[in-house]
Image: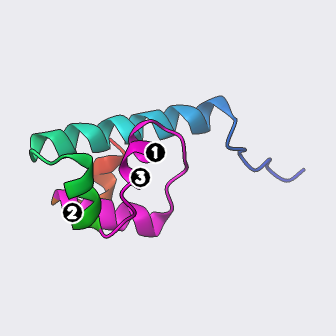
Amino acid sequence: MPARKPQPTDPLVQEVRIRVGQRIRELRLAKGMNQDEFAAAAGIHRTHPGKLENAQIDPQLSTLVKVASALGVRVDELLT
């Protein structure tokens, strides 16, 4: 029997989304950036940081790479 693909509504997926969003907010604030400054630095739409930080969307890997670069961290640091 093949493994079931996690759905966006699965509790584990939601928990990871929340943790990643909290970590992004924590790192952004430590850099002294507001969401608009952060979005510009990361090259993402200005509404994207709020959606990430509030766990409203699942970030794509390419977005996580941009976010990590703007925050001066490795991608894996967003997941811890």
Q: Is residue 35 left or right of residue 10?
A: left
Task: Give how far apart the Cα atoms at labels 1 and 3 are.
Answer: 7 Å
Instruction: Look at the numbered disc 1 and give the secondary structure of its residue.
Output: helix
Badge 2: few (under 14), some or many (20 or more) residues near its Cα, within 10 Å?
A: some
Which percent across, then down, holds residue 62?
A: 44, 70
Q: Is there any visible trace of residue 10 in the rendered image?
A: yes
Looking at the rendered structure, which numbered label has been put on residue 70?
A: 2
Query: Which of these two is toward me, 35 or 59?
Result: 35
Give whichever of discs 1 and 2 has the lower sequence position: 1
Kind of residue at badge 1: Lys
Q: Is there any visible trace of residue 73 in the rendered image?
A: no
Magenta region: which residues? 43-71
Q: Residue at x 32, y 59 (%)?
A: 75
Q: Residue at x 19, y 46 (%)?
A: 34
Kind of residue at badge 2: Ala
Give whichever of discs 3 and 2 has the lower sequence position: 3
Q: Are marks 1 and 3 in contact (CB under 8 Å)?
A: yes
Residue at the disc numbered 3: 47
Which percent across, then down, holds residue 18?
A: 46, 34
